Every structure is written in structure tokens, then in C-alpha cells.
Amino acid sequence: MARDERGVTPQSEDFSSWYNEVVTKAQLVERGPARGTMVIRPYGYRIWELLQADLDGRIKDTGHENAYFPMLIPESYLKREAEHVEGFAPELAVVTHAGGKELEEPLVLRPTSETVIGEMMAKWVTSYRDLPLLLNQWANVVRWEMRTRLFLRTTEFLWQEGHTAHADEAEAMEETLRMLDVYERVSREMAAIPVVPGEKTPGERFAGAVKTFTVEGMMRDGKALQSGTTHYLGTNFAKAFTIQFSNDAGHLELCHTTSWGMSTRLVGGVIMTHGDDKGLVLPPKLAPHQVVIVPIARGEQAQTVLDAARELATRLKAAGIRVHIDDRPQLSPGFKFNEWEMRGVPMRLEIGPRDLAAGTALLAKRLGNEGKTAIALDTAPETLLTALEDFQAFLLQRATDFRESHTATTDTWQDFTTAVATGWARALHCGRPECEDEIKSETAATPRCIPLDGLAEAGVCVRCDAPSAYGKRVLFGRSY
Ligand SMILES: [Zn+2]
């Protein structure tokens, strides 16, 4: 089939080109004028808003409160936690001049907010009665990335960052895992991405963390996307910022803190988990338009059909369905079908005079059952609610099957390299950073996580034959 102007490069030919073409043609995002920045267009921003609203509800349901901290952070703050500044130094954007003169102290555009929030926590926490302190902020952050890619790695991106302070390690660890569970559910239930929750190996930890946890999703090119991370920070930031409390015996103790974040990156994850050669495929829960109605009629009948489409849309809206009528008169139905396929709309309804006379509309799903089905207009809201729910479940199952069929348990180096060429490998590893580096330079694969649900197992490292670490298998893959 000839590729027309609206089509995209097939995934199998060049996944990266496919991605870049889809994000543009589906009208999600555009490159910004400054290097590595992105403009999120209304259709892409709506996806983010739907995700954000759901995640915000879950963050509040687990007892956190939203606040807002400044984007400009004194440079000296970052230097207080040695590992933190070392980890972030190469990515910092620093303001040295303002108001027409050089600043006495440079200001950093926040790459993350542990430091400024730590400074405030030290003010707000004095007694054990002030704990736990459970904060979240929705914000933009700036990280000067070498290689940028829209949604996945941009100089500025949107996210939420949770920051909490606790009386002891057990409580802080419980919080770290609770929020990991929230990220797993959001990914699975909203984005239909069957992520694997697990712990990062020491080499992949957040700068300044004692433990880092992650949810990893598999994209359709077999690569992994880290979709959200949670960190147990121990007392590292509490020491650096003097976040302490007097316990019930009146003695001063350092707080144990956590931080956790999920970002606009997940929108990129949705695109790469579900999209196909016709373009974007959106899970209904994140689709700006769950159903698009295309009225098809000319001349005298046009108004009658359009009125019927509007009446149907009103009933679908009342049932809680996000519906859009494509009544642009100058465009052909075929053009509209292609456009909504490219933009990933889960369900399309066509209504013409003959359908109307029969009391039906033609339903076409973006994926799954090929072809069109006539559905009764009377019961359309119920029919579509069920169809949308089924479609959401279908995408999750399809992604789960894909992940399973592209993940192998490997015990030899040869099997390992074969597995990570197209997907993931579960392997025993010695835990040595130099060995991780060797694996990375030879195969481009890195340890994605030590899955939480992995079975206890020991043996020798798949790469170097040294005794295995962690007591279970590590998941390896190439990643974004
Ligand atoms: Zn090894």
C-alpha cells in the first residue's frame, strides 16, 4: 500500500521515525523554540489532564496534600547533599544574571525539589506530632538533557513530585512502597500499561537515595520505559537540611524522608505501548474523545442526519462518555476516518440517512474486531459504555501478552543477548557495577529492576559467573 501524506513509517521499519511522526501527526506535541523543549498541544494536554486528575485523586486519597514551591533554588542548596549535586550537576540550568546584573548567588532552575522542600520541612517539623508530613506538588522541572525526545526526555517537563517526612525507617519504607503501588495501578488501570514494579540496582538509584523503586513498562519495540519512581531517602536529606523532631521522650531525632514522581513521560509510554502503523491508539480512560461521530449525508438530508448525531451525542454525554461530532462539511468521510485513526480515537460511529431510517449507527473500533457493526441508536449509550470498557481491557491484555512473549528467563550469555535484542531477560546477576557496565556496552541493556514478585533464586551471574546477588533474578532490557 502506498504511503500517503497522512500515513506514517511502519513500526517494523523504523520505530523511532514512527514515534516522531505519530506525535506530530496526531497533533499531540510540537518542538519548542529553545533546544529540547516541547509545546504540548491541546489534544496531548488533555491526555495529560485526564492522567493527572486520576493520579491527583489517588495522591489525596492516600493522605497527601498539594503545595507549591518555587522554581528557582539557591545553588548552595543543591550542594548540601553531596551525591544529589553530583548526580544532577551535568543537567543543571543555572540563572547567573537577573535584573540587568550578575547575581550574588546563582539560582538553579529546579531539576527536582528535595532541597527546597527539605529546607521548608526543617521549619515545619519540630515534634513527633508534626509527623508524618505528606506533601505533593504539581510542577515543571528543567533538566539539560543531551539527547532529547518529545514526551520521553525533554529539557522541561511536567510532573508531580511527592515529598514526605516520617519518624522512622519502617514508616518511610511503607510510604515508598505505597506510592509505587499507586503508580502501578495508574499505569495499569488508566494507561493500560502492564508495568513491572521492582527495586533499582544501586547503579540505577536516584542521586541521594538509599533505595529507589520503579515501575517499568515494555514498549512495542521491546525497550523498557521507566514510568514512575519512588525513593526512600533515609536520613540523607534530613541531615543536609536538619529535618528533625523531638520524640515522645523529648530527644531530637532525624526524620526519614521519601520522594516520588510521575511525569508527562507516561504519555510517551501510552503512545509506544499501544500505537500501530495507522498511528496512535488511546486507552478509553485517557482518550480526549472516546467516541467520534461522523455524520454522512449530503444535500437535504444533511441537516436531519446532523440533528440526529447531536441528539445521540447529548445522550452519550449524559452517560459519561467523552464524545465529539466531526461535522466539518468540507472534508470527506474517508479523510475524517483516517484522521481519527491517526489520533487514536477508540470508537467511531458513522450515521447516514439509511442508518437513521433503520434506527442504527455503524460502529468501528480502532483495534480488535475488524470491520463495522450496526448498533441500535436506542441503546447506544449502554452498548458503547460496555464496548469502551472491553476496549480498555483488550489493550491491557494485548500489552501483557506482548510483554510476556518478549520476556525470557535466561541462564546463558547467548540466550541473554538474544533476549535483550528484542525484549527483556530475567537473569541472575552478581550486582557488581563494572559487570553492569560491561553488559551495557556489549548489548545496550541495563538492569531495569529487581521485580518485587520475583521468586527466591541464587546461582551465578549470567555475564561473569560470580555468585549472584539480590536473592532473585534481575530484569534486563534496553531502555528509553
Ligand atoms: Zn557479573
Image (cartoon, grey):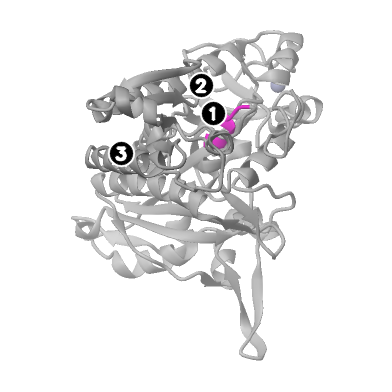
- Where residue 89 appears, as percent x and y from the top left, is 67, 60
Q: Along the polypeptide, which appears first: circle 1 or circle 2?
A: 1
The span shown in magenta is 270-276
- Asked whether, in this view, residue 268 is left or right of residue 67, the answer is right
Q: Work out whether mark 3 precedes mark 2 in sequence or the reverse, and give the earlier one.
A: 3
**Is 371 placed above or below 298 here?**
above
Q: Image quadrant of residue 420? A: top right
Distance CA(mark 1)–CA(mark 2):
7 Å
Distance of label 3 from label 2 (alpha carbons) = 37 Å
* 470 or 273, nearer to the observer: 273
Q: Residues within 10 Å of mark 3 (few under 14, many from 20)?
A: some
Residue 407 shown left or right of residue 360 in the figure: right
Mark 1 Cα-neighbour bin, 10 Å: few <14, some 14–19, many ≥20:
many
Query: To which residue does mark 1 refer?
Result: 274
List x then y, in percent, for residue 93.
66, 66
The residue type indicated by label 2 comes to: Ala
| Quadrant (top left/top right/bottom left/bottom right) for the N terminus | top right
Question: What residue is at 80 percent from the left and 30 percent from the top?
Answer: 441
